[in-house]
Image (cartoon, helix red, strand yellow):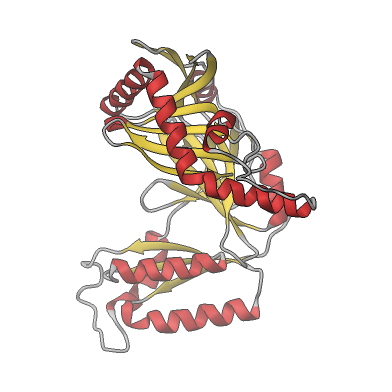
């Protein structure tokens, strides 16, 4: 599978940003659908102007790689208004550009994903990595990394099918300046390394933790939270909290203990609040359905009590500092959407929305 790609190197100061935009606009108009990566070497362009440029190019599906050069480099070189210090950076571009690496990497539980701006043809593909190393190097980098690339629909389908989660891959890539991303330069292939295999085996092992008063929680690595099934007023629901720093997890667990200790009270408060906020909307939906079926309706189609009864609690997300999120099956009030109620132990329910 071949994808048309162009890489560009520019070296300039902020006064030449308008000319850069003109050049790239012309490129986009003359080569629609081409994947472009722009390496920008500079020494002092303000962050807000770089952010605006990066946002604009992302809307086109272009990748902008920002490389800040030390101001001491070529500081004694002769310059003019038309020929700034940055002009000289191209002479040492090979030294400043990220090195091309042949890597082996372990994909994470989050797997493959992508996004694109409305109206654009190209996606930004992203593969979560938990570890990577250069081929023939003993050094292994572990943490949260992303392997990224611009991709058309065909490449997205290829990556979705060929790069599973919890897998070892190999490919050629450039490491970003901040070290958090690897820019894909060729299609990933299956790979193997015994040390990476050991890391992969370890990360696939189940992780559980006992929480006093709540029971055993198991880590869901796909969404990176701990979850458990608990009894809530005679029905099984999911209880979960994000994996994070110990203090925040302990705070979320306190939220859970408080809710579980007063289930009937919190259940009634949350259902009642949701009914007050969403009853009118539910009746609008029901009226629309009746009109489509040519049925007449007299009194309110759904009462507050009926609304509350039809809500089916599925899960509660526990948050630090007493925060919570209740998720309900809507009982077909909104044709299969979810009802989402947020709030806190201190203030009670604060927001109710139909989602999904």
Quadrant of the rendered structure where residue 46 is? Answer: bottom left
Residue at (51%, 22%) from the top-left corner?
238
Residue at (43%, 27%) from the top-left corner?
268
Is 217 situated left or right of 282 in this image? left
How far across and down, in percent of the image, does residue 239 sit? 46, 22
How far across and down, in percent of the image, does residue 201 sit? 54, 19
Residue at (56%, 31%) from the top-left corner?
311
Is 45 situated left or right of 139 in this image? left
Quadrant of the rendered structure where residue 314 is? Answer: top right
Give the total of numbered labels: 0
Is 228 situated left or right of 324 in this image? right
Residue at (29%, 29%) from the top-left corner?
248
Quadrant of the rendered structure where residue 98 is? Answer: bottom left
The residue nearer to you, when weighing 53 against 105, is 53
How far across and down, in percent of the image, does residue 100 sit? 50, 51
Up/down of 354 relative to 72, above or below: above
The residue nearer to you, when weighing 342 against 283, is 283
Up/down of 187 relative to 60, above or below: above
Residue 30 appears in the picture as rendered: yes
Q: Residue furthest front?
A: 298
The residue nearer to you, when weighing 300 against 23, is 300
How far across and down, in percent of the image, does residue 341 sit? 44, 38
Residue 92 appears in the picture as rendered: no
């Amino acid at each position: 599978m071949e994808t048309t790609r162009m890489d560009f190197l520019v070296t300039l100061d902020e006064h030449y940003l308008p000319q850069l935009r003109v050049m790239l606009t012309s490129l986009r108009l003359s080569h629609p659908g081409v994947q472009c990566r722009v390496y920008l070497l500079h020494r002092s362009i303000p962050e807000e102007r770089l952010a605006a440029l990066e946002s604009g190019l992302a809307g086109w599906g272009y990748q902008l790689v920002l490389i800040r050069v030390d101001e001491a480099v070529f500081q004694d070189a002769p310059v003019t208004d038309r020929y700034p210090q940055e002009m000289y950076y191209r002479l040492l571009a090979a030294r400043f550009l990220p090195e091309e690496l042949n890597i082996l990497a372990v994909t994470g539980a989050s797997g493959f994903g992508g996004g694109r701006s409305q109206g654009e043809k190209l996606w930004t593909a992203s593969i979560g990595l938990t570890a990577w190393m250069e081929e023939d190097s003993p050094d292994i980098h572990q943490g949260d990394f992303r392997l990224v690339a611009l991709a058309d629909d065909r490449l997205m389908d290829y990556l979705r099918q060929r790069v599973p989660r919890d897998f070892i891959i190999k490919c050629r890539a450039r490491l970003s300046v901040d070290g958090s991303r690897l820019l894909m330069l060729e299609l990933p292939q299956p790979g193997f390394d015994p040390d990476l295999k050991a890391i992969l085996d370890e990360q696939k092992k189940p992780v559980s933790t006992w929480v006093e008063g709540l029971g055993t929680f198991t880590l869901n690595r796909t969404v990176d939270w701990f979850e458990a099934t608990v009894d809530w007023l005679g029905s099984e629901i999911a209880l979960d909290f994000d994996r994070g720093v110990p203090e925040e997890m302990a705070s979320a667990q306190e939220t859970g203990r408080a809710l579980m200790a007063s289930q009937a009270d919190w259940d009634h408060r949350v259902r009642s609040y949701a009914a007050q906020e969403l009853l009118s909307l539910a009746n609008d939906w029901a009226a629309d359905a009746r009109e489509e079926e040519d049925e007449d309706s007299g009194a309110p189609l759904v009462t507050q009590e009926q609304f509350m009864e039809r809500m089916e609690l599925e899960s509660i997300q526990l948050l630090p500092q007493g925060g919570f999120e209740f998720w309900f099956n809507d009982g077909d009030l909104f044709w299969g959407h979810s009802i989402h109620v947020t709030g806190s132990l201190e203030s009670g329910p604060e927001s109710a929305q139909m989602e999904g």
